[in-house]
Amino acid sequence: MRLPAAPVKQFISSMLKTKGRKSLLAQRLFWGALTGCLAAIILGQSPFLESLELTMLKWRYQVSNQVSAIGLPAVQSPDVTLVTFDDSSQFDLGIARFNDQYSQDILSKALSVIEKGEPAVVAIDLDLRGAANPDLSWLFSRFRNVVIALFGSLEGSTDLPAAEFMAHAASYGYSELTRESNGVVYRLPVNYAGRSKRQEELGFAPVPTLTEAIIDIYRKTKGVGPASQFMSQLPDQPVYVNFRPLKYPVVSLQEVLSPGFNPKIFQGRVILVGAMFTARKDDPLRCKTPLSDSVPELVVQAQAVSTLLDNEVIFSFAAQTARYCLILLGAVWGAFSAILPPSRRIVFFAAGTLVLLAIAQFCFQALHMAVPVVPPQAVIFACFVAGTVIFLDTDLRQRNRELAEARESMQLRAEEERRRIAEDLHDETLPALSAVARMADQLSDNLQDNPLPRQMRQRLDQAVAEMRRVINDLHPSVLETMGFVPALENLLNICSRESGLESSFADGVSEQETQRVSWFAKLQLYRIVQEALNNVHKHAHAQSVHMAIKANNGRLIIYVTDDGVGIDPKLIKLDSHGLINIKQRAQLIGARVEWNKPEEFSSGTQLMVEIRTG
């Protein structure tokens, strides 16, 4: 695992460490793609988004049907006919259920008429539990094209039709279609692939859905038909009913029993015999489809059968494939969202949303493919928000980096200018003052009684000393001649000598550790310590001052401690140029500076400066 991961880590590390505007694009692409992938992984598992996707699927069904209906007459199903048992049949025939000899005798008469029309399949979706009419059972065994719908579970014999019916029927299957928790029926039951573990334990044969059983018998009876899709479909790849605006020929059970009825209308067709009562809105088991909020189960079964017979199945992506595609979308969209400015990002987001909806609708209507919309939309929105944050954050960081580089450049130029002025003063002004001092000595020898030459000499000596101090302040050559740590100690000695303070110096670093610090950082640290000692001398009213320098875990730490009156860093005023200058210099080199109360004194101030040495 280490070998493949090493190049990736090296690439990411090198990319994040590069500087300048050129690296800004790479960083935004990286963080945007990473954020998009994380958003896709998180949102792709949301059950709430799956529920919204079903709502969007209903909208696509409706749009597809409206577009298909423009300028086109209603299409009648060429394969399916409905024989219905409705409200009027229930009262006119005096039948409540088909689980008694009288009711089944009426169904037997109707089935004998239907079979005269030579239909391909007759599916009976009625309650045949209980009694077994011999005539009806004989019809099942004679024609061998009857499919019985099962209502209950195989575990309970009372929920199944009579054994005689099941023995003589061509096939049987569960009448319930795949239904979501909210009652929505979109999916086709074409994922049947054999026995379940529970069925194997109980010793029962695998039972398909009613739609699958009808398709099987249709294929055996006519020798043609749709491929056995439910045997080859992936378990995690749902397929959907194509709810098209089809009209199904509807014949009531009373019409079939009436004299003079012509059964030839059933020839070669799939006949669905079932109930079509008035839909009740308070029915908790009602089916929700794009056709209506509540439609009879028989119509939904007819739509499912028509979808398979016409090879109009709407496919979707397998769950694993959809997840990978969503992650890829999140990576691409997150990367683009992170590199676009806010104004273009809004246009990109709006255009992407519209394009996604258009592509999904085109695939649904033309290619019969259900492309997910809601999870990608959620990922796009998450990428939009994250991309905005990444863009602004990286832009702010880059501006701060450029500002720091500009300040560092200004400091370097200022130091160069100070160095030039110090060299000019040292090479030109000091020799001139020294020459004047020698002239004052000559005058003092010639005018021994006149005190003016001696006063001139004293003033000139003071001017030369002040000039040397100014030169040292402008450019501390002691850093180059003595080294970093001795230069700091020299500062402490000068402060002690000029102010009369007791001083001590603790050196806890080696020369190798100080060499890891750049010359520019050493110069800024020198200036910070110089300013701190100057504040001790002028404002602290201290009796002693101590300095310590040490190294700890790749960091160089400098302490300047006094026993003076102390300072509250929160009360630093805007005109406190010394302390503000210390903060700015520390920020310039990435150092951390703090003012605290010293532990070894009852009062006073401890300045701590910490900088990384690598």
Image (cartoon, rainbow, N blue to C red):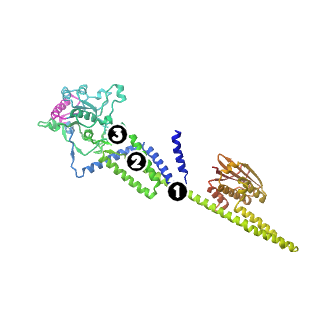
The chief SS type of the magenta part is helix
- The secondary structure type at the circle numbered 3 is loop
Residue 165 seen by the camera: yes
Which residue is painted at 77% across and 60% down in the image? 498
Q: Is residue 94 magenta?
A: yes
State the image quarter where residue 238 is shown: top left
Q: Residue 163 at what x, y percent from top left?
A: 25, 25
- The kind of residue tagged 1 is Arg
Nearer to me, 18 or 112: 18
* Marks 3 and 1, the one that precedes in the sequence: 1
* Marks 3 and 2, the one that precedes in the sequence: 3
Question: On screen, 76 above or below 585?
Answer: above
Which residue is painted at 79% across and 71% down in the image? 436
Q: Which mark is residue 238?
A: 3
- Provide the residue span drawn in magenta: 91-119
Q: Are marks 2 and 1 in contact (CB under 8 Å)?
A: no
Q: Residue 527 at what x, y percent from top left?
A: 68, 58
Q: Is residue 103 magenta?
A: yes
Single out the mark in the foreground, 3 or 1.
1
Residue tagged 2:
376
State the image quarter where residue 135 is shown: top left
Disc 2 crowd rating (10 Å Cα; few below 14, some 14-19, many 20+) is many
Disc 3 crowd rating (10 Å Cα; few below 14, some 14-19, many 20+) is many
Instruction: Tell me if 599 is positioned left or right of 42 in this view.
Output: right
- The kind of residue tagged 3 is Pro
Which residue is painted at 33% across and 31% down in the image? 194
- The kind of residue tagged 2 is Pro
Disc 1 crowd rating (10 Å Cα; few below 14, some 14-19, many 20+) is few
- The secondary structure type at the circle numbered 2 is helix
Q: Are marks 3 and 1 in contact (CB under 8 Å)?
A: no
Q: Residue 514 at what x, y percent from top left?
A: 68, 50
Residue tagged 1:
21
